[in-house]
Image (cartoon, rainbow, N blue to C red):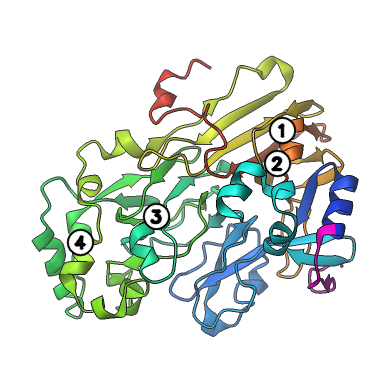
Amino acid sequence: MNTVTSLKVVKKKTQSLVEAALEQSGGLLRLAPCWVPRSFLQPGKRLKLHPDDLYAFGLNRGGIDERWFASTTPAANDNRTPDEGLSYCVAGKQRFTLQQAVEDCGALIVGEAIWKKYRRWPVYSKFFDNMGPIPHHMHQSAKQAKLVGQEGKPESYYFPPQHNNVGNNFPYTFFGLEPGTTKAQVRRCLENWNKGDNGILDLSKAYRLKPGTGWLVGPCILHAPGSLCTYEPQWGSDVFGMYQNLVEGREVPWNLLVKDVPKKNHQDLDYLVEQLDWESNVDPSFKDNHYMEPVPVADTRQEGFVDRWIVYGKVDGEQLFTAKELTVDPGCKCTIKDKGAYGLITVQGSGKMNQLTLDCPKLIRFTELTQDEVFCTAPAAQAGVVFENTSPTEPLVVLRYFGPEVNPDAPEMGAYRKNKF
């Protein structure tokens, strides 16, 4: 069996390897699966990872409930492996991290604008898959995260139907706080951390999750994600603070509340409360300002394919990431031009993407190579990528996410209400 671990790891400069791979594939880099465990969560078993491999990192590390896509962002886990969270490119019998490829090749991979401003690939996406809900938490803003040498983390959600044949234990997500909630009430929840359930969810509202829809969530907004398998384009950071102390009877330790807070503020309840974006959390129109449904790029159904925006909108006036879902009918072919680089994951069917084979696996072993994940370089995206569905019966469906300010033509929040197709 062709496995990731059997490939030679390249540590020298990768430019020649990357250029050869791009020439052979038509501007694309094949990526190996990147699995990430979480010690405080229970896997939802919808990542197509073999059941025997759910605890491949060891029981002490927790179950694998995430798969990261086109990631150059290390996972912020205790006792993590040196390359945990980093995606590997595969070129023949060799492999190297996408992080190293970007460092060595710059604009050839991510495009001139992103390379000039960030000198890296500043975003990533993941499948997030749990059996039940996770704690009500927030992700720090850029300003807050900078205090501990990190970056802030806005994120987005899309619930792909192909990975949600079951909803698991709690397909509802709490967002924000009920209008009228006071800072004193949230502070009291933190005061009661060691007295049983601190009651933070009593101050919030849960929304039923629906496959084929999504949400855009800025930093400093409380949210307790439910149990649908979620595709999450987001900023390249892994900061968070858990404000709920008990979930399904499982304790959430205080250190997960303050892990990305300056040490001098670890017991400063007022500081922890003030971390929250109060206006956004108590917004009476929260759903109107954060909920998304897909918006077709154009009416191309008669041509045998449909490309749809699944993540759009801005965070604090900035477009930090966007995402699309492409569906190609059986036996059809299309050329898709995009304005910038993207990470791609195949969620249904089989076919080709330029010279690379795409195939959505039914079951994946922990070290197994797949043919479902690709990084498309900026030049290839702009020139146009040919997608072909080679199946006579099944649609080819791929998700792709983009970096900051790549898609100025993306819809505004609420655009789904005007959808004509």
Main structural element of the magenta stretch: helix, strand or loop?
loop
Give the x, y percent position of residue 250. Answer: 34, 75
Q: Tell me the kind of residue under disc 1.
A: Gln
Element under label 1? helix
User: Mark 2, residues whose alpha carbon is within 10 Å: few (<14), some, or many (≥20)?
Assistant: many
The residue wearing badge 3 is 226
Residue plotted at (50% across, 44% down)? 159
Position of 158 with respect to 20 (left or right) is: left
CA gap, disc 2 and disc 1 = 6 Å
The residue wearing badge 4 is 274
Cβ atoms under marks 2 and 1 closer than 8 Å? yes
Q: Mark 2 or mark 4, which has the lower sequence index?
A: 4
The residue wearing badge 2 is 378
Position of 332 with respect to 52 (left or right) is: right
Q: Mark 3 or mark 4, which has the lower sequence index?
A: 3
Q: Tell me the kind of residue under disc 2.
A: Ala
User: Mark 1, residues whose alpha carbon is within 10 Å: few (<14), some, or many (≥20)?
Assistant: some
Q: Which residues are magenta?
A: 1-15
**Residue 249 in sight from this viewpoint:** no
Cβ atoms under marks 3 and 1 closer than 8 Å? no
The residue wearing badge 1 is 382
